Every structure is written in C-alpha cells, then in structure tokens.
Image (cartoon, grey):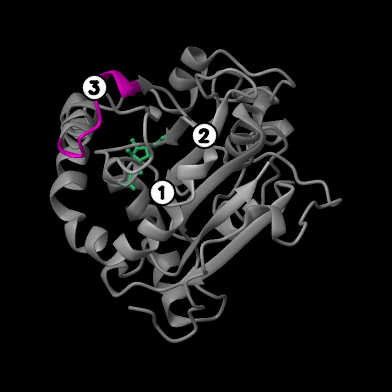
Amino acid sequence: MQQQGAVALPPVARPGRGPSLTTTKPRRSCISAALPRLCRCGRRHFIGSSSATAFLPLLALPAPAASPVDPEVMLERVHPSRPEWYEKFYATAMDKFMKPYEAEIAEYKSKLFSQLVAAGKNILELGVGTGPNLKYYANADGVNIVGVDPNKHMEEYARAAAVSAGLPSSNFTFRRGVCEALPAEDNSMDAVVGTLVLCSVSDIEMALREIKRVLKPGGLYIFIEHVAAPDGSFLRFVQGAFNPLQQFVSDGCHLTRETGEIIREAGFSSLDLNTTCLSSAFILSPHVYGVACK
Ligand SMILES: C[S@@+](CC[C@H](N)C(=O)[O-])C[C@H]1O[C@@H](n2cnc3c(N)ncnc32)[C@H](O)[C@@H]1O
C-alpha cells in the first residue's frame, strides 16, 4: 500500500509526545490579509487586497473576529448554496466513486480513528460528506457525532452510513455549516475529525482557528488531507494545470494546497504528521495524515 517516499504508518500515535510545533511566525488569513500573490492555500488573492476591496465591497470578506462569526452568516458567505442539481450530483458522485479510495485508505483510518476510543464522547466531523468515516466511530462506545457540511444533499447519505455503521440515530447529528465558523461552543469537543476537507474550505487558517476553538484543551484533531506534490515534480505541474478545473467540478477543491505545512504552523501543542501516496488517489496525491493535540 505504501509507495516510494512514503513514511511508515505510525504506531498508534501519542499526541502528547509529539514534537512541539508552535510557531512564532505570524501567518495571515487567506481572506483577511490577502495580497495579490499565490498563497500556500493555492489561490491568488486579488479580492482580498485593499485596493480591490474598495471596489468590491460586496465580495470582500471581513477580517476574522476574535470571537466566532455566526455560523449561518458564514455558511452563506463562504459557501452559498450551489444549484440544486450540482449539490445532488456532487453528493451522488462522492457516494459512488470513492469506494476504491476508501478501500485503500481503510488501514490508515482504522489506526488513526482507534485513538478516538480514549479521546472522549463529543466528536465533530468537518465536511462529513456521505459519511465514509462513520463506521470507524462504531468502536468508540456512546459517542455523539456532529457532522458538519454545507451541502444538504450529503445528509441522506451520511444518515444511511450512520445506520449501517450501527450508530444509534440519536448519536449522529447533521448540521449544515462550514469549517470557517463551526456550529459548536468553545472548548466543547473531545475530537475534531476531517478527511479531504481542508482542500475545499475558503479560508484554511480560519478553519484551523475554529478547530482549535471548539476543541477542549488536550482535544485531538485527526486529519487526512491531500496536498500539493513536491515543487518541480511532474505531478505538481499536472496539479497546477488541472487546479482551476478541479475547483470548478469538485466544489472548490484545490490540488495545490500545502495543507500539511499550514497545519504545522497552526499552533497545536503537539503534532504527529505523516505523508503517504495512494494509487487510487491519482492527482490527489500525496496525502498528509496524523493527529494534532490542542
Ligand atoms: C471531498 S469531500 C470529502 C467528504 C468526506 N469528508 C470524505 O472523506 O469523503 C469535501 C466535503 O467538504 C464539504 N465542504 C466544502 N466546503 C466546505 C467548508 N467550507 N466547510 C466544511 N465542509 C465543506 C463538501 O460539501 C464535501 O462534503
């Protein structure tokens, strides 16, 4: 399963023991302090620059407040409803075409998600989609899972996945929302899980701040994300060429984000971050996966 250049799957990670990766280098939010340059989130920022915002006040997003923005307002701002047919199509496509990928990633997910058993009962999943991860919670007894996703058509798939995973329906709640303003209280979650989501958010740094906000101290952030291939590689060239099309057809998914580096700089107290390549992921390679601890 593992490919050249990939590192071994970690033994069950001990987040508290990982290297401390707090950074002193300030990073600027993609939305709030964007300059007209290509950022590591994979976008060129013109709309966020001050001269542009003077002319495009309706398109510009405000600087992130210290306190969270209303989740409903943020949902409409960063992910207004797409045409009905598109949201349905995307949900159906995710349900139908991800099976080979899910089979290949299963071993990674089993090991990562096994850490939830000790984490606690309150789990929030970012961009829960059709719910391919819900079966991994079944071992964690009595968990309450809040699945957040802006696409309302994901709900029926996610609910069906929860039922077939044997999760009591009262233990799974679907909330329409976005990572940039999570519908959860400060310090309320034992774990936040996100797989293939930070590629799609509008503001990755805002999303990471929200993850840290809702996690309890010591809470775990478990992630699997596809990231940009190494600079100069053929794959990176292909990703750059297909990036606009990918964003268009796959609901804003970026192929060239350096998500691992951005997680590294997000100020978690510890981080276990690994890299791998999966044959079924094609240009959504390589992947980073691991656990961060608030
Ligand atoms: C590639 S799918 C992954 C779904 C699921 N996590 C999985 O592993 O199959 C990306 C998901 O993120 C959702 N999404 C897009 N923008 C989002 C945002 N700003 N916040 C939260 N979820 C978002 C999409 O609706 C979609 O369900």
Of 87 and 14, nearer the camera is: 14
Q: Position of residue 26 (x, y in %)?
A: 82, 46
Residue 169 shown in magenta: yes
Lateral position of residue 111 relative to residue 129, left or right: right
Q: Which residue has dot 1 on it?
A: 195
- Numbered tag placed on residue 169 in the rendering: 3
N-term mark: 1 or 3: 3
- Residue occupying the point 26% across, 69% down: 280
SS under mark 3? helix
Q: Which residue has dot 2 on it?
A: 120
Lateral position of residue 38 relative to residue 147, left or right: right
Of 2 and 238, nearer the camera is: 2
Q: Which residues are magenta?
A: 164-174
**Pointer 1 residue Cβ closer than 8 Å to ligand 1:** yes
- Residue occupying the point 51% across, 34% down: 120
SS under mark 1? strand
SS under mark 2? loop
Question: In the rendered structure, which amino acid carries the disc numbered 1?
Answer: Thr
Of 107 and 58, nearer the camera is: 107
Question: In the rendered structure, which amino acid carries the disc numbered 3?
Answer: Ser
Lateral position of residue 159 relative to residue 41, left or right: left
Q: Position of residue 203 (x, y in %)?
A: 57, 38
Q: Position of residue 147 (x, y in %)?
A: 37, 29
**Pointer 2 residue Cβ closer than 8 Å to ligand 1:** no
The quarter of the rendering in which ligand 1 is drawn is top left
Q: In this rendering, is residue 265 above or below 233? A: above
Indicate which label's residue lies in the foreground, 3 or 2: 2
Q: In this rendering, is residue 269 above or below 6? A: above
